[in-house]
Amino acid sequence: MSIFKIAGICGSLRKDSFNKKLLIRAQQLCFEHINGATIEIIDWSQLPIYNQDHESDPPQSNIISVFQVH
């Protein structure tokens, strides 16, 4: 059981992102060397970006409910 859970969020959505590769490597190193800590990489690529124009009438999306549950 993890004592510390760290959320890893990559700012780049590019499939072959160097930042995402570094985040994955950090996750591996954390697992190998830090007892009681895990890094969970959050995939936010399907989450709609905030748009103030949609504030009064937001588009319906199943992905939002997935993030709320998680």
Image (cartoon, grey):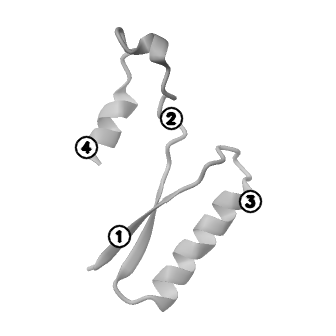
Q: Amino acid at mark 2?
A: Gln
Q: Are marks 4 and 1 in contact (CB under 8 Å)?
A: no
Q: Which residue is mark 3?
A: 18
Name the residue carrying label 2. Answer: 46
**Numbered disc in front, either 4 or 1:** 1
Query: Label 1 to label 2, Cα distance in Å?
Result: 22 Å
**Side of 8 relative to 64 (left or right):** right
Marks 4 and 1, how far apart at CA:
17 Å
Q: Is residue 55 above or below residue 7?
A: above
Mark 2 Cα-neighbour bin, 10 Å: few <14, some 14–19, many ≥20: few
State whether residue 49 is above or below residue 19. Answer: above
Q: Position of residue 32 (x, y in %)?
A: 50, 88
Neighbor class of circle 4 (other Cα within 10 Å; few <14, some 14-19, many 20+) is few
Q: Is residue 70 left or right of residue 52?
A: left
* Residue at image mark 1: 5
User: Element under label 3?
Assistant: helix
Kindly identify the amino acid type of the residue bearing the numbered disc 4.
Answer: Val
- How far apart are labels 3 and 2 at the CA level? 19 Å
Residue 20's x, y, as percent? 64, 59
* Pointer 3 or 2: first along the chain: 3
- Under circle 2, the secondary element is loop
Contact, mark 2 vs mark 4 (Cβ under 8 Å): no
Task: Measure the C-alpha gap from mark 3 to mark 1.
Answer: 23 Å
Give the answer, above or below, for where 48 lies relative to 54: below
SS type, badge 1: strand
In the image, which disc is placed on residue 69? 4
Within 10 Å of disc 3 (Cα), the crowding (few <14, some 14-19, many 20+) is few
